Image (tube, rainbow, N blue to C red):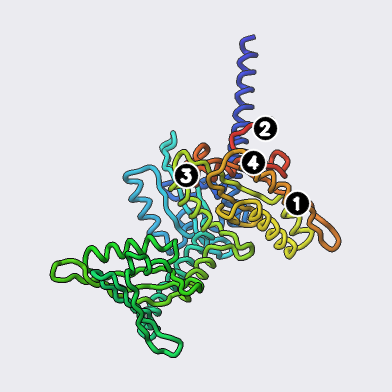
Amino acid sequence: MADIEEITDIEELKVRLRETKEELDILLNNMPGGVMTYDADTGRILYVNEGLLTIFGCNEEQFRKHFMDSFSLFVMKEDRKKTKDFIETQTQFFDYVELSYRSMGLAEDVRWFEHRATLRTTAEGQRVFFCVLTDVSNQKAIQAEIQNVTEQLYIETERFKLIEEAIDNVEYDYDVETDNLSVSKKDANGVRHWKNIEHALAGGQALRLIHETDLDVVKSVLGSAMKSPGKGVVEYRMAEDGEAYLWYRLNYASFEGKNERIIRIVGSAKDITVEKLEQERLRTEAERDGMTGLLNKTAMQLYCAAHLSKSDFNDCHALFMIDTDNFKSVNDTLGHGIGDDTIRFVADNIRNVFRDTDLVGRMGGDEFMVLMSHTTLEIAKDRARKLNDKIRSEVKGDDASVHISCSIGIAFFAKDGEDYDTLFRAADDALYVAKESGKDCYRIYGEVEK
């Protein structure tokens, strides 16, 4: 009898072991990015998961043949020495390595990977790296574009400096002791005229035309200039005679008299409105999704992370992950043109449901994200219900139609996460639950549906 019970226990353990292995395989093959293990001493690749194979668009046999089962060959030739040296240096002190490098795929396409690896020694004494690889090629491309835009902005700024003398600047001369400001400006015919403003600061005459958003900055600069002699630059918006606000860059210098008190401030202000508009255009191009006009993935991540880092622990912000249900069927059945129109339809409805102050972005494909600041659980639920109602519709083509809806996952700062990465994972988990619940619904992270 005892032998039968022991056999039963062993069989139960085998079943549990098999189920656990199956669950582990599911997790490995469905996690974002890829997983790899390799021998730390020989570099031989021991294991790769389906996620990594999917990134390269191949099966395991093709993958192993292409990289010859070698981690060294997995890393692009130009990055190998740097990668090898970095790993060797880090593992002298730590059992964890984090770095980035490039890899060339089977189609000779170059991909950037963020590599996080932990070094472990097996019972047989083999040293093995367990790696999680995230494809960050898109982020790298966008960062390169942002850097390029930044360089263009620098070139443009320098160019504007070089031609500054040829522009009709506004000249200022302020007598501190008399509070009298003299302003010189050219008229339409190129003739320069001077105008005196009495009680310029005491009476507020010199500041009333400054845009209210820039007023504190200008006051702070003036305060510093009146405390000690020196030079500086300040940018601000100003309007005259009810006209639209223009951007100016004021280069100024303050001088002290015999009693070591500031007696005079002079400056030259240049109209930089065109330059500012160009900067804004370039910045928008770098941050916006071309199809929808929403923030792109990288900009959304950066803005969300910055906003959360400045938030108080008691603030309540809701992070929404939104996925368009049946979008693949729209593309496959009705064509990519209608698919693009559908993406714009979803984006417009998201923009309309949420507030102008909320961060709204397209994370790629048919997936969107919203960070709703300073809200409550009930308000977030209300917005989710409204969005479900707005998106639920029939997309019609010439000969067929596809029913679309949206699935929504919601997580809350700081209850579900105090930083962007943690909060994103929570919202993404809630989105997965919404998908598994039949789509066309929303789910709150951590809530159990009755």
Question: Of marks 2 and 4, which one's residue comes earlier in the chain?
Answer: 4
Instruction: Identify the residue under disc 2.
Output: 449
Q: Of the two numbered discs 2 and 1 on the same chain, state the one appearing first in sequence.
A: 1
Q: CA distance from mark 2 to mark 1?
A: 23 Å
Q: Which residue is under mark 1?
A: 404
> Which numbered mark, 2 or 4, is in the foreground of this view?
4
Point out which mark residue 306 bears. Answer: none
Label 2 is placed on what type of residue?
A: Glu
Say which amino acid is labelled 3. Asp
From the viewer's perspective, is residue 21 above or below residue 29? above
Q: Which of labels 1 and 4 is toward the front? A: 4
Task: Give the Cα separation between the discs numbered 1 and 4.
Answer: 20 Å
Q: Secondary structure at mark 2?
A: loop
Residue at horizontal 60%, vertical 46%? 320
Return the disc, 3 or 4, that comes first in the chain's sequence.
4
Q: Which residue is located at x 44 percent, y 67 percent? A: 147
Report x, y in % for residue 234.
35, 68
The 10 Å Cα crowd at callout 3, few under 14, some 14 to 19, many 20 or more, is some
Local SS, label 3 = loop
Q: Disc 4 residue type? A: Lys
Q: Which residue is mark 4?
A: 381
Look at the numbered discs 2 and 1 and tell me whether their residues touch, using CB distance below 8 Å: no
Q: Which residue is mark 3?
A: 419
In percent of width and height, residue 76 lies at 47, 61
How far apart are labels 1 and 3 at the CA level?
32 Å
| Residue 270 location (% of width, % of height) | 39, 77
